[in-house]
Amino acid sequence: MTAPIFVALDTTDLGQAEGWAKAVAPHLAGVKVGLEFFYAHGAAGAQKVAAHTPLFLDLKLHDIPNTVAGGLRAVLAHLQPRYINIHAGGGPAMVSAAAEAVAAASPNTRLLAVTVLTSLDDADLAAVGQQGPAAEQVLRLARMAKANGANGVVCSPAEVGMLRREIGPGFDLVVPGIRPAGAASQDQKRVMTPADAMAAGATALVIGRPITAAADPGEAARQIAESLAR
Ligand code: C5P
């Protein structure tokens, strides 16, 4: 059994990304590639990484419904990731167009919505005309995303317990901002350990540097997986 963790491959180096994917594959659920990697290497690069382990394609699409659906169909013609995501802020019609496109193009792919970026605080929300506090906006957007066919959301450690209580089971909560006990938090402000995040109701976790910056990423992945098995 692998641990429900996707390793963030935040690099533009294809060889490095493949090496990390190979090293963690025996221990963890998969890897996450985002805009940095995808703009550098496209679907062909993502396919190379996905040959080793399942993929979370973190592309955060946000456009009119027709364009988002078309973009998803185009990418899912080449890749069948475990997760792909959009911005919930695109609205109900965009979320439901995305959900339909994913279900038709890649039935085993789960569609996640991004609610409020964790880089935004209440003052930033006010600056873009969104009603805070951030936690309420997160819940509002998560409920809307679920009602329109999304399979889950990406959320911070600060929100995972609240969302699981409010939304119930069967809706994936995928949580970055995770640090093993004793690890440096780097630029993450509010962090949780893998075990605490799972206990709070996370479905899967996203962990980057504690694994990719380790001297032996495979061993770091193995230890984190073991900390969840206890
Ligand atoms: O290295 P680290 O574990 O901090 O990496 C976390 C990953 O999760 C990065 O790819 C980051 O962009 C992503 N992420 C995050 N916080 C969010 C959303 C995504 O850290 N709110």
Image (cartoon, helix red, strand yellow):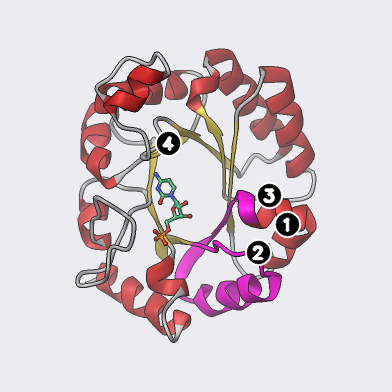
Residue for badge 3: 80
Height in image: 190 above or below 220? above
Say whether residue 202 is magenta: no
Q: Which residue is mark 1?
A: 40
Does label 1 or label 4 sit earlier along the sequence? 1
The part of the chain drawn in magenta is 8-36
* Among the 4 quarters of the image, the one containing residue 192: bottom left
Return the disc, 4 or 3, that comes first in the chain's sequence.
Answer: 3
Q: Residue at x 65, y 73 (%)?
A: 18
Residue contact at pointers 3 and 2, CB within 8 angstroms = no
Kind of residue at badge 4: Val
Which one is nearer the viewer's eye here, 163 or 87? 87
Q: Residues within 10 Å of mark 4 (few under 14, many from 20)?
A: many
- Compared to 136, does 161 lie above or below? below
Regarding mark 4 in the picture, which secondary structure is present there?
strand
* Residue position marked by numbered label 4 in the rendering: 153
Instruction: Check if mark 4's residue and mark 2's residue have beta carbons within 8 Å.
Output: no
Q: Nearer the viewer, mark 1 or mark 4?
A: 1
Q: Amino acid at mark 2?
A: Thr
The amino acid beneath tag 3 is Gln
Q: Earlier in the sequence, mark 3 or mark 2?
A: 2
Look at the numbered discs 1 and 4 and tell me whether their residues touch, using CB distance below 8 Å. Answer: no
Indicate the amino acid at tag 1: Ala
In percent of the image, x 39 and y 52: which residue is there?
204
**How far apart, in angstroms, are the residues tagged by discs 1 and 2?**
6 Å
